Image: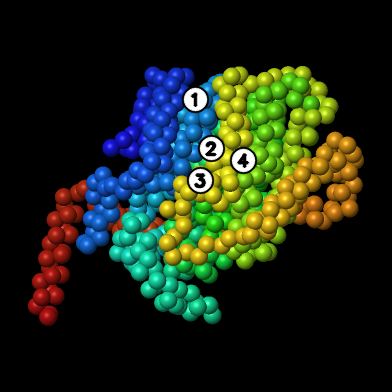
Amino acid sequence: MIELGILLGPLAAFLINGIFGRLYIKKKAHYIAIAGVLVSLALAIFTFFRVANGYRLDATVYEWVIAGKITIPFGILIDPLSSIMLIVVTFVSTMVHIYSIGYMDHDPGYWRFFTYLSMFTLSMLILVLGNNFLMLFVGWELVGLSSYALIGFWFHKKSAADASKKAFVVNRIGDFGFYIGILLVIMTFKSLTYHDAFDYEIIEHIKNSTFNIFGLDLSLLDLMTFGLFCGAIGKSAQFPLHVWLPDAMEGPTPVSALIHAATMVTAGVYMVARCNPLFSEAHTTSNIVVFVGAATAFLGATIGLTQFDFKRVLAYSTVSQLGYMIMATGAGAYIAGIFHLFTHAFFKALLFLCSGSVMHAMQDELDIRKMGGLLKKMKITGYTFLIGCVAIAGIPPFAGFFSKDEILAMTYASGHKFAWFVGTVVAFMTAFYMFRLWWYVFVGKPRDQHLYDHAHESPWQMTLPLILLAIMSVLAGFFGFPPEHGFIHKFLEPVLVPEHMHIHHLSSSTSTILMIISVILAAAGIYVSYLYYVKMPELPAKTVKAFRPIHKFFYHKWYFDELYDVLFVQPIIMISKFLWKGFDANFIDFIVNAFGWVAQFLGRFFRIIQTGRIQTYIFTFVLGVVILLTIFYMV
């Protein structure tokens, strides 16, 4: 089976580098890791063209779990959705692998880094290729584990160690709901395979069986899909579990590109899209999904406006863009959501790798207030970053325009006018804060002459992926042209448009008006940022002074970290200390020590009569016999 080769490439690289890397392979680990991911990429492209020509596969490799009448296979599913995800994951992963040769060149953990990259890629491919919820769950948790290793790669730094733990713990909160959702799936459908779980007749039956919970009438289908969506809230960094993603910037920059572009954070979007037969009939959950997506998009954009850490601005941009994708899936626009996932993967990976190139040139400096004028010294990085900025801003004909515009149009058509309004406002803010980065970093005069003097363009291993990703950031949007009738729509329609789903359409005039509004606002965002940071650089200080409370609120990330610290972290620490010092030390330890004290007391007592003299033992023996005989006759 050719499709198994997609998994075997990264698996072999992971095992070889993991076993032999430290002692034998060392600085040559990238050869094995890149060879493994290139095998996956080649097979993924081959599979994509086969699927485009009508090929489908839903095969069982072997029976994995047999429990009574329930059988769960290790199975492979190849369809339009999985094939396009394979392209995204393997292509971006390949670019990150090549880029890492230059970026991680002097790191002592070189072989370990490439081992983790292979493990991460393998985990994501398992998640995408599985034909059942158990394989999805295994890939889901392996992605969490490997991201923990990559985020905390520089574990000697406390900030990196804390960030990896935070990502792991916050994801477990969302995964608890995910577990509940999967349990409801197996209880309802008596199976975990997608084919059985998407049975329309059973779905129709369970959506009419309601439960009253806290005064709300919820169907079993709503409970099931909400549980699954909780997993997406954690994995795809949605409000209110978005707090782990910006802290994940503590990992090496190639890790940031891999996690934030095409893999881990998009797993939740992929899962919701894959489960579209369930979500499209769970109307209460779908409304929650739209609200969460819109709130996340707005939240991420407002915080991104005020940050000065290069990578954190991009991180909050990712949070915002993921909000767009989730909002689209909630509105029933599953194709639009996956289309944006597809385009976003290229320009967001490009933006993150450009930030790493700047760090490489600026001695790992991340404060954009110390940068400026770098375009003169880093033309490839500067212009490819500009392409990424234009793409994410949604300016035609770049990739982000097509997918973002379709999400806004479909959200409007589905009747979620407020979500459309929020998304349109976010489009303005996205253009503003992305070009704020561009003006700060690449335009104007150097703000730190010493750093500027040492700046230089990155080696070819780092600039080649930038060029390839920039090309895709320009061209990827044309897969969705013309809107709603492009190649990607026809390609994904058999999987992402449920047979009984009502499709919302807009008139051409309404669609054109919405598109014009979106483009005008994006262009306005670019122009306003130009006024603020180039033409009239005194404006930012005046604006901050005029809106200080709002600026402070956004700058401190809506105080989510402080709020969670007060509501959850500190109470848990207090309870833990009480259980440790009050209960464990004073009660549990007392009981355990009491047994020792009793044994010690008895030992001291019996030690008195253990004199070692035979006369004493004979006397004690005779005395004991006399006492026993006396007791016997008295009784």
Left or right, 526 with respect to 206, comes to right
- Mark nearer the N terminus (1 vs 2): 1
Seen from the viewer's position, the closer of residues 196 and 301 is: 196
Q: Circle 1 — which element?
A: helix
Disc with the residue nearer the chain's start (3 vs 1):
1
The kind of residue on which mark 2 rests is: Leu
Q: Secondary structure at mark 2?
A: helix
* CB under 8 Å between discs 4 and 2: no
- Say which residue label 1 marks: 110
- Judge by depth and name the residue closer to the eye, 635 or 539: 539
Which residue corresponds to mark 4?
A: 399
Circles 2 and 3 in contact, beta carbons < 8 Å = no
Residue identifier under label 2? 258
Residue 122 in sight: no
Q: CA distance from mark 1 to mark 2?
A: 17 Å
Which mark identifies residue 620?
none
User: In the rendering, which numbered label is found on residue 488?
Assistant: 3
- Alpha carbons under labels 3 and 4: distance apart: 13 Å
Mark 1 or 4, which is nearer the eye?
A: 4
Tags 3 and 4 in contact by the CB under 8 Å rule?
Answer: no
